[in-house]
Amino acid sequence: MSNRARFSLTIILVLLITLYARPPSAHEEPAATLPAIPPLSAINYNSREGYFVLYLEHTPQLSLIVDYATDPSFTTISNQYPWFADFQQLTLSGFTDGEHYFRVAQYPAIGERQRPIQVSNTVKVTVQHYDTSLALSLLLFGAAIFVCLVGTILYFHTRYRTND
Amino acid sequence: MTESMTYALPTSLGLMIISIFGVIWIVYGWYLGRNNRTHDDFALAGRQVGLGLASATAMATWVTSNTTLVAPQLAYQLGIWGMVGYSFAALGLILFAPLAARIKLLMPKGHTSGDFIRLRFGRQAWWPFIVISLIYAIGWLVSLGMAGGILLQALTGLDYHTGMSIILLVCVMYTLFGGLRAVIATDFIQTIVIIVGVVVTALFLIDNVSLEVIHNELQHHHPRLLDMLFPAALMFLFNNIFFGLGEIFHSNVWWSRALAFRKDVAFKAFILSGLLWLPIPIVTGFIALAAPYLGIYPPSADMIGPMVTAHVLGKFGAVLVLIIVFSALASSLDSLLAATADLITRDIYCQFIAPQASDKQLICVNRFCLAGLGVFTWLLCLPQVTTLAALLHFTGAFVASTIFPIVLGLYHPNLSGRTAALAMTCGSVIGLLSYFIVGFYVAALTSCAVSMVICVVGLRTSNFSFRWQHIREHDS
């Protein structure tokens, strides 16, 4: 074989090696595209009762978990809530005053919730409960009217029963 | 999709259970209704209902979607006070007991609450009253229809519209055949189903879920639910009481029962039913507090009760919940359909269209109204516009305005029709304004307060004196 032919063969082999020297994933069938997590929003971003509803823009195709944190960067996830079936909304309750951050995430499997496969946008819900003094005033106001009503019924019932 | 949380029952099983119960109720309604001869038989069960049936029907009617779905919803949203506050609605039944005895004394042959308002206050108060009654009846009917759809959807995944349509159809059918006699008899059976079901559920829950872990979970992650000074819950407390009182005091559902019960029975029956009803919302509400510990977070807060029970008790629990809530819904839906159809027949058809109508005509019109109400409710239930609690509390602004006019109207001869009309109208308008401006927690409270102030001022300045004999003369 001439030097020229040997050189050409070497170049061809090098090119072939280069062609085959791709990462293993390049040889696999392209993976099926995962359904994306729908955008997350809240029906009420400001809550005065400590409960609110998180909402997905369309029906979820995946098993999802809601991550909750008190900081927008989710450095510490305070709690996680499983999303129920294929409903578009989820109701949470019992939150204290402050800013609460939520995102929806897909995790590899139940119990492995450290590294999500994909996450949604973050939603901020602000909880500001009613003033306790206002609530107690209304409670007392209601109690006063109730006492008047019960007193009226008992008074007339006793009076008419005696007359009858 | 792979679901970490999914439905407790297969759709086909849910449909089968509802169909079996539906057929039983319809056949039973037809069987009971075959002896209805007069309109009194059809609309007031012959006016001779005894203590057992009377207590059962009053209790079963008050155990409704409110108790089985909204009590857990309020516990989930407002915590302990939501649950306890809801049980105070029993005060409505207990405080109606003396009023029922008085109603029976004043108009032993009366037919509807509208009859009383017209005779006692005249047309000017009758108009706002009838508008309030119809708004409330439609609101309650829609909430019951919606509750049926929500229940089946939460437990079996059955489409909301299909579930709602089936439940409405079953209740309309058996009420159509049997009238109030069928309503009261089915209520008795439904009461037994409800009490046994709730007790079994409570026993299973206590056995499966420890109170301590529920408390710990709530304390760490949902602390406000345990807070005895939870502001929204405190605001809700008396509002809910006045809402319940307004519902019972004005509604023809309860007046028709007072008139259908034997004279010596009315007072005792309402007291007994109130005492029997009192613990039920505590039990149904408590299960919602276990939800966070069990990792159950509902799409809509009114689904929480069935979801938790089905989760804890498995398939058996889901079947149990389905039967209990279906019975509770049916017992209220049939009562409301019967009472509202009777109100329309007596107060609108008899007053404005055919005052001389025969019994046969009245039964026919009553049935026509019943079917029409069923279709109208179905149409309003189609767009699921709001949650059950929100819908119910909207009607609270109206009904609470009737409390003082009715109580004083039954006992105090100096309350005039003009004052009663003004109290109901102003109370409703201001209650509605508070509902939209402040929130649902104050709607019934402000409505009742405004109505009370107008009644008190009216009494102070009144020269009017009503002659009770007028009602008795007309009644006889």
Image (tube, coloured by chain):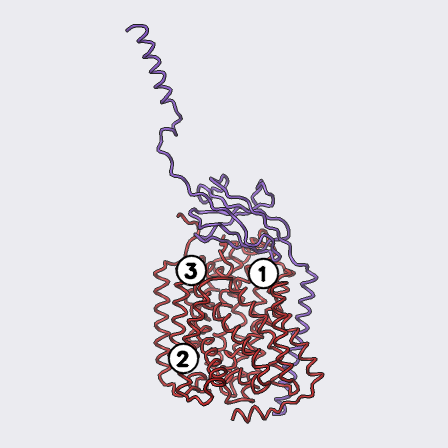
**Residue A131 in view in this figure:** yes
Residue placed under numbered mark 1 in the picture:
B78
B76 or B421, which lies in front?
B421
Find numbered disc 1 in the image and state the secondary structure of the residue it sits on.
helix
Q: Is residue A56 left or right of residue B24?
A: right
Instruction: Pinpoint the chain carrying mark 1.
Output: B
In this rendering, do the residues under marks 2 and 3 share a single chain? Answer: yes
Q: Which chain is red?
A: B
Check residue B367 in the rendering and tell me which mark sits there, or answer none.
2
Structural crowding at the residue carrying mark 3, measured as other residues with C-alpha within 10 Å and reported as few (<14), some (14–19) or many (≥20): many
B412 or B262, which lies in front?
B412
Residue placed under numbered mark 3 in the picture:
B153
Instruction: Pinpoint the chain carrying mark 3.
Output: B
Of callouts 2 and 1, which one flags the residue occurring earlier in the amino acid sequence? 1
Structural crowding at the residue carrying mark 2, measured as other residues with C-alpha within 10 Å and reported as few (<14), some (14–19) or many (≥20): many
Find numbered disc 2 in the image and state the secondary structure of the residue it sits on.
helix
Q: Amino acid at mark 1?
A: Leu
Image coordinates of residue B237 in percent, x first then y, are: 61, 67
* Name of the residue lying farthest toward the left: A1
Of callouts 3 and 1, which one flags the residue occurring earlier in the amino acid sequence? 1
Image coordinates of residue A40 in percent, x first then y, are: 51, 48
